Image (cartoon, rainbow, N blue to C red):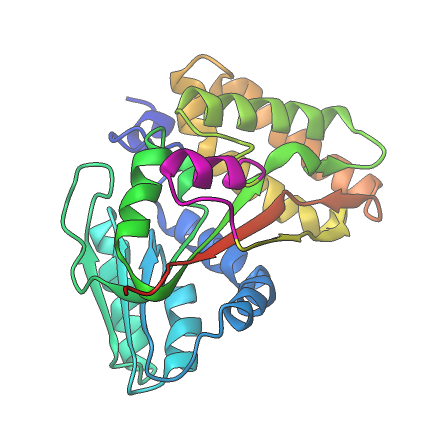
Amino acid sequence: MSSAEAERPQDGYALSRTPEEYQRLRSQARVWEPATGRLFDQVALAPGATCLDAGCGPGETMRLMAQRVGPSGHVTGVDVDASLGAHALAMLRDAGHHQCDFARVDLTAGDPVPGAPFDLVYARLLLYHLPQRVAVLRRLWDAVAPGGHLLVQDYDMRSCGVLPALDSVDELLRVMLGAFNAAGCDVHAGARLPQLFAQTGIGSPDGTDVAGRIEPLASGRAVLEGTFRSVMPTAIAHGITTEQRAAATVAAIERDAAAFADLPVVWPLLIGAWKRKPTER
């Protein structure tokens, strides 16, 4: 078995489950912290509220929630990755956020969501990865308390790239998008959020939001390369690239980052949508 095959999750998830990938997820979450905080303001997340972070990963958004709801509130994180969730919970409690809990829940399998209903049900970069995104979104809506909010943020990959184009980055994006598509992801999930809300029976969102990020290739290379390395086992398994070709792509990116350090790297758009559940009469 090759190293790429050994790192590939067996549940169809496109990305690897390695310490390097977990650190990439933490760094990515911190980049989007202001964009998520702005939407927490939009839905008026307040002290004492109860929250669900669906697909909580390394717990960075749970931390944001805990800071806002305070000790009188409660934050529940759910994820299929029990090891990552346990590590996130330990980190949060070490930081004094004892109002946080974690449970391993597979939202695609009908597992019960502990603690429902919630004042806020939140998911970021979750629906992107799930072919069952309509059914999962319906479950999230069911977990919202009357008068509470459902808030979702997800990627649209169409903006991702470098200007002007470079062959190395084009190849990297070809492999990444091919692997995501092969794993059943929707690389335009963010732009489809209003449509998904409608298909779920939630109705049109109360509002939408678009956040972006641009940085020079000198630093943006780490983001591109980290995601590429994480998705590489899936790409190789589906015949999208080979280990040798992937290594050549990484080497080319590193050369181009040194030669064209100031070229702008445009991240995917992070698109948000939210909906308040009517209060019961």
Identify which residue is drawn at 77% across, 37% down: 162
Q: How many marks?
A: 0
- Vertical position of residue 101 compared to residue 226: above or below: below
Q: Foreground residue, 218 or 198?
A: 198
Is 18 placed left or right of 106 in the picture?
Answer: right
Q: Foreground residue, 93 or 19?
A: 93
- Vertical position of residue 51 compared to residue 242: above or below: below
Is 233 placed left or right of 247 in the picture?
Answer: left
Identify which residue is drawn at 30% across, 40% down: 136
Is 133 placed left or right of 84 in the picture?
Answer: right
Q: Quadrant of the C terminus?
A: bottom left
Q: Quadrant of the N terminus?
A: top left
Q: Measuring from the top left, give residue 166's x and y in whole percent.
A: 78, 28
Q: Measuring from the top left, give residue 100's x and y in whole percent.
A: 26, 73
Magenta-highlighted residues: 191-205
- Vertical position of residue 190 compared to residue 180: above or below: below
The reply to whether the magenta stretch includes residue 243 is no
Is 57 placed left or right of 79 in the picture?
Answer: right
Q: Quadrant of residue 113?
A: bottom left
Identify which residue is drawn at 61% across, 35% down: 157
Q: Foreground residue, 132 or 8?
A: 132
Identify which residue is drawn at 55% across, 52% down: 272
Q: Foreground residue, 260 or 44?
A: 44
Q: Residue furthest top?
A: 239
Q: Measuring from the top left, give residue 246's x and y in whole percent.
A: 55, 24
Q: Measuring from the top left, give residue 92's x and y in whole percent.
A: 32, 74
The reply to whether the magenta stretch includes residue 197 is yes
